[in-house]
Amino acid sequence: MKQKGFTLIELLVVIAIIGILAVVIIINLSTARVKGRDARRISDLNQARKALELYYNDCGQYPPTLDPTEATGCQAPVTFGDFLANPPADPQTGTPYTYTYDGSDNTFALDFTLEGGIDLYGAGPHTMTQDAIQ
């Protein structure tokens, strides 16, 4: 009489294949999350740069800080918050990016770090200025 069912070897092979597939999927998900956060960083910073340019057009200079309630450098009641409600922050940690304003030549810099790199920008620290991302 022939018994129906799977042998122990067959079950172990199937379990190993499922385990390998699970590892591959988890690795790909992790990579997709990193790329998603990097894309959000670039998008948030481009939005901040546009808001800074709008502030510059109205006030003749960039704001000394990204505080949305501060009106320094512009006539009240105009504040940076009129152009961007919340300063950009890192999507992973929630900490705001470092903003530096140089009043001597009226320029700004926003420092940020990409985890995995995106498009033309590799992983690591970068700076966004009024001209471009460096």
Image: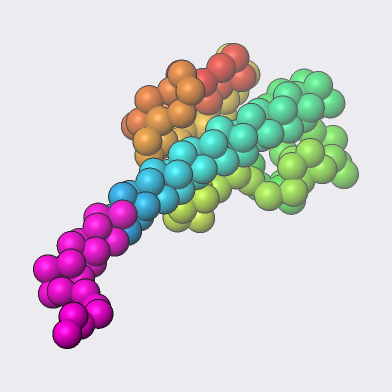
Could you say which is closer to the camera, residue 34 or residue 134? Answer: 34
The boundaries of the magenta stretch are: 1-21
Could you say which is closer to the camera, residue 46 or residue 13? Answer: 13
| Residue at screen point 25% across, 80% down | 4
Whether residue 86 is visible, yes or no, is yes
Q: Position of residue 19 (x, y in %)?
A: 25, 61
| Residue at screen point 34% across, 32% down | 124
Q: Position of residue 20 (x, y in %)?
A: 25, 55
Q: Magenta span has 31?
A: no
Q: Position of residue 89 (x, y in %)?
A: 55, 48
Q: Indicate left or right for 86 with 1 as reference.
A: right
Q: Position of residue 23 (x, y in %)?
A: 28, 55
Which color scheme does this rendered protein use?
Answer: rainbow
Number of callouts: 0
Asked if residue 119 is positioned above or below residue 99 in the image, the reply reads above
Asked if residue 31 is positioned above or below residue 109 in the image, the reply reads below
Q: Quadrant of the N terminus?
A: bottom left
Q: Indicate left or right for 12 with 80 as reference.
A: left
| Residue at screen point 23% across, 67% down | 15
Asked if residue 44 is positioned above or below residue 7 in the image, the reply reads above
* Magenta: main secondary structure: helix
Quarter of image, res 13: bottom left
Specify the farthest residue to the right. 77
| Residue at screen point 32% across, 58% down | 22
Quarter of image, res 107: top right
Q: Indicate left or right for 112 with 77 as reference.
A: left
Could you say which is closer to the camera, residue 29 or residue 70? Answer: 29
